[in-house]
Image (spheres, grey):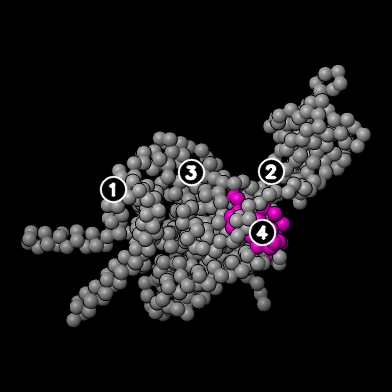
């Protein structure tokens, strides 16, 4: 059976749409990064550190505090500004690439500041939230009533 | 001679009024209701612009089956379900913003094509009763949708997000939060006019869809659909594959309804998993009929007039009900009652007109 030109055009169109879908997944995927300023391994927490992700500066994170940043996409630039023991301010930048399957990661700031040239895997790690959320029992009831959406229309 | 002309004019005005009875009725309702509601002009403008943006794509998706003589496609709820499935997946994968909408549209497309093909094939076996059949197919597929979403998702179909899955471990929760994509299209190009925010990007997308519909009418497939819509037997004798053309019209309508549902829900910002789609067909069809469309004739103009009039009534009805009787719920009932009433009235008027035309043709033949 000879396959016509239109067949190949259709296949190419389907492949293009699938590729577009994959691209959308990569550029639209949202990740949460926890910015952790607690003692890590034997490295002491920093007195004060500020992290700017893609130029968006966050609030100062003091010793034994944790902040979070929500980012979209995989590649980002982080600028870390910290104060050392002599109260001198230092800033350095690092590029990070978040693995696509990760929803939440934790960035150990004291380790990063102590080892700024170390590989990303050492200071940016997978994080599984242990938070238990108290739920309203009524939220778990499934409503199949058609008229329930009328108010929203 | 002049007397004859006057008579003719009188008849034409009367006919014009009968043919546009539904829009005239709605203009009257809105004219009385707006002052009673007490809403400011800017609030009403904001509401109408927002509703125009979020509903236009859905209502426009109804035009193609009308062109192919399939009547008002109540089966558009199938497309809405497909759009919702796409949104559930992108929410689970944590994809946000415009990419989430595009990805949801891509996921919904094959589901819409499958459902549209199924619906079109069934409708081909129910020629002449397409509307009631598509209405019932909508109910049937709602059961299948509930089975998939309530029992398969989280068990057979992998859904990992605890914010989506019910605590029992399978099935999707009543509401899916779409806050991460809320108004991402509407606010893409931010413009304010008289204090009302205009969803420019959504309007551009709707305008592109309108152009596609105008272009589509001129294509070979579009011409075939019009021929099938006018007379199936003549179209068949002309070599048009009638059944295939009819199925294609339903598939296209279902796919566009899926896209429309995604646009609609990005504006709302919350997906009611088991209810959002259920009323969408009825309200979209009612809006189209309010715009002066009928079972066999609908245009882009009818879509926009219909949405403006129908949604003005929708916006003001609860407040008018509260201001007049002290019960907002009455306005709520009123707008639902009016939606069903409009569809009934339009169907009755269509039947009267068809019979009158048939009688006229018979008299002329005699």
Who's the residue at 9% across and 63% down the image? Answer: B4
User: In front: mark 3 or mark 1?
Assistant: 1
Q: Chain of mark 3?
A: B
Quadrant of the drawing holding the N terminus of chain A: bottom right
Q: Which mark is residue A17?
A: none
Q: Residues within 10 Å of mark 3 (few under 14, many from 20)?
A: many
User: In front: mark 4 or mark 1?
Assistant: 4
Measured in 3D between alpha carbons, the distance from the residue under mark 3 to the one under mark 4, in whole angstroms, is 34 Å
Dot 3 lies on which element?
A: strand
Q: Position of residue A101 (x, y in %)?
A: 76, 51
Q: Position of residue B127 (x, y in %)?
A: 43, 78
Q: Which mark is residue B166?
A: 4
Provide the residue span drawn in magenta: B157-178
Q: Which mark is residue B31?
A: 1
Dot 1 lies on which element?
A: helix
Measured in 3D between alpha carbons, the distance from the residue under mark 3 to the one under mark 1, in whole angstroms, is 26 Å
Q: Are marks 4 and 1 on the same chain?
A: yes
Who's the residue at 46% across and 39% down the image? Answer: B197
Q: Is residue B346 above or below residue B41?
A: below
- Front residue of B354 and B25: B25
Q: Is residue B357 above or below residue A24?
A: below
**What residue would you read off at disc 2?**
A72
Q: Mainly helix, strand or loop, the magenta region? A: loop
**What residue would you read off at disc 3?**
B199
């Amino acid at each position: 059976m000879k396959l016509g030109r239109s067949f190949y055009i259709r296949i190419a169109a389907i492949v293009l749409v699938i590729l577009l879908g994959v691209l959308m997944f990569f550029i639209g995927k949202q990740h949460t990064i926890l910015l952790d300023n607690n003692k890590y391994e034997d490295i002491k927490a920093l007195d004060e550190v500020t992290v700017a992700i893609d130029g968006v500066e966050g609030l100062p994170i003091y010793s034994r505090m944790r902040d979070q940043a929500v980012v979209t996409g995989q590649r980002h630039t982080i600028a870390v500004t910290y104060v050392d023991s002599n109260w001198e301010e230092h800033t350095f930048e690092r590029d990070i690439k978040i693995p696509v399957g990760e929803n939440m990661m934790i960035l150990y700031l004291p380790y990063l500041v102590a080892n700024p040239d170390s590989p990303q895997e050492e200071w940016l790690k997978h994080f599984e939230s242990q938070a238990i959320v108290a739920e309203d029992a009524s939220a778990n009831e499934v409503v199949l009533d058609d008229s329930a959406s009328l108010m929203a229309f | 001679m002049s007397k004859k002309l006057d008579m003719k004019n009188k008849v034409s005005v009367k006919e014009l009024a009968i043919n546009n009875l539904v829009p005239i009725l709605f203009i009257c309702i809105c004219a009385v209701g707006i002052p009673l509601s007490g809403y400011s002009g800017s609030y009403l403008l904001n509401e109408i612009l927002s509703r125009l943006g979020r509903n236009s794509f859905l209502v426009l998706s109804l035009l193609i089956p009308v062109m192919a003589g399939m009547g008002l496609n109540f089966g558009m709820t199938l497309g809405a379900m497909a759009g919702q499935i796409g949104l559930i997946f992108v929410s689970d994968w944590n994809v946000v913003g415009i990419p989430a909408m595009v990805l949801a549209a891509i996921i919904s497309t094959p589901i819409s094509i499958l459902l549209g093909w199924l619906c079109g094939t069934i409708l081909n076996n129910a020629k002449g009763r397409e509307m009631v059949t598509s209405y019932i197919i909508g109910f049937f597929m709602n059961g299948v949708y509930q089975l998939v979403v309530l029992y398969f998702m989280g068990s057979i179909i992998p859904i990992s997000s605890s914010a989506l899955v019910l605590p029992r471990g399978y099935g999707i929760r009543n509401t899916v939060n779409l806050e991460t994509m809320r108004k991402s299209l509407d606010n893409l190009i931010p413009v304010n006019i008289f204090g009302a925010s205009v969803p420019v990007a959504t309007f551009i997308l709707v305008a592109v869809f309108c152009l596609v519909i105008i272009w589509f009418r001129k294509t070979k497939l579009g011409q075939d659909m019009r021929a099938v819509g006018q007379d199936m037997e003549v179209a068949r004798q002309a070599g048009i594959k009638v059944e295939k053309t009819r199925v294609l019209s339903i598939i296209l309508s279902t796919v566009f309804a899926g896209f429309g549902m995604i646009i609609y829900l990005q504006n709302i910002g919350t997906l009611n998993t088991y209810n959002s789609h259920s009323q969408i067909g009825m309200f979209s069809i009612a809006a189209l009929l309010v715009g002066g469309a009928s079972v066999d004739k609908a245009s882009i103009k009818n879509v926009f007039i219909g949405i403006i009039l129908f949604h003005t009534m929708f916006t003001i009805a609860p407040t008018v009900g509260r201001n007049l009787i002290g019960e907002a719920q009455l306005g709520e009932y009123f707008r639902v009652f009016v939606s069903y009433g409009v569809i009934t009235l339009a169907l009755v008027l269509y039947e009267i007109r068809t019979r009158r035309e048939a009688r006229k043709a018979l008299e002329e033949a005699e």
